[in-house]
Amino acid sequence: MYRYDEFDASFVNQRTEQFKDQVRRRLAGELSEDEFKPLRLMNGLYLQLHAYMLRVAIPYGTLNGRQMRKLAHIARTYDKGYGHFTTRQNIQFNWPKLEDTPKILEELAEVEMHAIQTSGNCIRNVTADHFAGAAADEVADPRPYAEILRQWSSLHPEFSFLPRKFKIAITGAPNDRAAVQVHDIGLQLTRNDEGEIGFVVYVGGGLGRTPMIGRKVRDYLPEEDLLAYSEAILRVYNRYGRRDNKYKARIKILVHETGLEELKADIEQEFEKIRYGVLRLPDEEVRRIEAYFAPPPLEVGQATSAAVEARRENDAAFAQFLAHNLNPHRVPGYTSVTLSMKPIGGIPGDASDAQMEVIAELAEKYGHDEIRISHEQNVILPHVKLDDLPAIFDRLTAAEIAEGNAGLITDIIACPGMDYCALATARSIPVAQRISERFGTADRQAEIGELKIKISGCINACGHHHVGHIGILGLEKKGEEFYQVTLGGSANENASIGEIVGRGFSSDEVVDAIETLVETYLGLRSGKEETFLEAYRRVGEVPFKEALYGAA
Amino acid sequence: MKVITANRLLNGDVVWLGENGNWVERVTLASTFEGKDQVAQGLAIGQDAEKAQKVVGVYEMDVSLEDGVIVPVRLRERIRAAGPTTHPQFGKQAQAVSA
């Protein structure tokens, strides 16, 4: 894992000291709320419906046991005993007191964590494939590049007041698990004909009220140009991005209004000016950062484990867990395990302090002290020995995070919605809970197969509903909650924006509507191997529309 | 009918303007305001409290009386007055029985 150097440590400590003083001045009346609000947002502190909310950055979703234990400690000491993992691989605490936040930031700094750039119109936490450094299909580990981008973008003076927030995602594998095409900049690691590492670059993807798939601006960007090219994109955006209308200020709108070719030319022109300057990445620096992410020493083992196979035979829950929650590891004898933060009927992404302690313990004992948070709000132990799976499963079962539902219909992304969020127009979590209960039996989930449901409680789309195979958007209509359903979205390498299927549904109707869609799919799929998304892409919306609303 | 609401600066708690300029923890204890002028007076008291670092984010919200008890009109405000519907053990709903 990356370790802070003296520069990292000093700027995090400086920022904590600054914020401590800003809170003191706010409480003393020396700063008004108008003056203080941008300062607290720069440190991840929001004011939500019931209380303040603190969003803590987990760079590219990677952390270790000590850091997870600190998050558990913060949940227990300063909050109500739980935290919420987000779709930017971060964690949010829902009930901190303003007066406690400087102390919380101090505690975070002790374990090399902070809340900087988790809010505001700046470059946000860079996200990455949660199986990075472990996945069998990977070209290379994307995290060294994510770390280089983090260092470049942290407190970058030129990009602290962008027209709007800016999100970067990176994947090292051709199977995109980091949703790179719906980010402001999406990077996909690739190799050229000479076998050298570089990036496919997408610009202008995003969700929110105007969802767009990113446009490819480079088929191959050499490794050494990563920062200069990123800076060129940001400069063009910073200069031409709209500041007159908050809702038209993201780079996707600039791409759309300017046109891809003209914008590409602007980026290339800016890039030519700076590509041989200070931002050119020296090979030795990339290798130095890479060394922090060196894989743990893993002994090549058997591709199957006798202990696992024996248990699979006579333990249905374990068999279900094996079938869905493991991702192929590049080293035989190992696997990456998804800990489901989606218990049946539970709150997607919530973890209690006790669960966080269990995750830390398992990572330290069985997982080379590595933990990942996925943008799908689950937790991953990336390097686990197959032989250890039974022991891990038992511990997870006791902690109620052992549901074998990764990628299935109950593995739902849901934003906090109107239960917490000041912007929300409807609740998300209760809808997720009811869907989870409706489809929650092991047999039914397995029969339905891969199906990603994503729920947002307002048009800002934190729950990624546009890229759900089934997306649900909560709105308010005549004072009542009201849910619009989209079909056919996807955030992988074949990304697509879901289409609205028809008029929306009341809170009472929406789960039945989802069941109708699922039953329609089961009735028309060509076989069990044809997923919901594949079937939808084959037959189109008509059968689903007819099932919901009757023939036209 | 309206009440004036805000969050306490220090801890973020949801509060409503009650009698004598006090900020109360229960919507049922809030002072009600009818008509533009009364609401403007209530908001002015709120703005003074903001300047005095007591509360933050003052605004007015619609309420109705049900059996003589103040109830927020919008679901958002009902959730704010009670706590997350998904966590009955947290928020005001977890505290003493409402007045």
Image (cartoon, coloured by chain):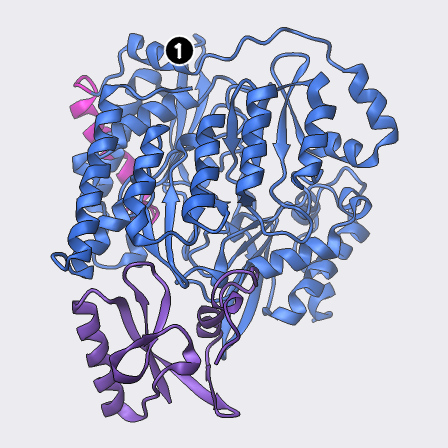
Chain colours: A blue, B purple
**Side of A457 where A264 appears, left or right:** left
For residue A259: magenta? Answer: yes
Is B36 in the magenta?
Answer: no
Q: Residue furthest toward the left?
A: A30
Amino acid, disc 1? Ala
Residue at image position (26%, 67%) is B55
Where residue A237 appears, as percent x and y from the top left, is 24, 42
A295 sits to left or right of A124 = right
| Residue A89 in view (yes/no) | no
Residue at the disc numbered 1: A291
Residue sitting at x 45%, y 51%: A462
- In the rendered view, tell whether residue A532 sits above or below residue A479: above
> Which is nearer the eye, A120 or A15?
A15
Front-lying residue, A113 or A334: A113
- Secondary structure under tag 1 reads helix
- On the image, the x and y values in percent for residue A323 come to 75, 31
Q: Residue furthest right?
A: A314
Quadrant (top left, top right, bottom left, bottom right) of the N terminus of chain A: top left
The percent coordinates of residue A463 (x first, y second) are 50, 51
What stretch of residues is rendered in magenta? Answer: A250-278
Residue B50 in the image: above or below residue A263? below
Residue visible at 35% across and 10% down? A287
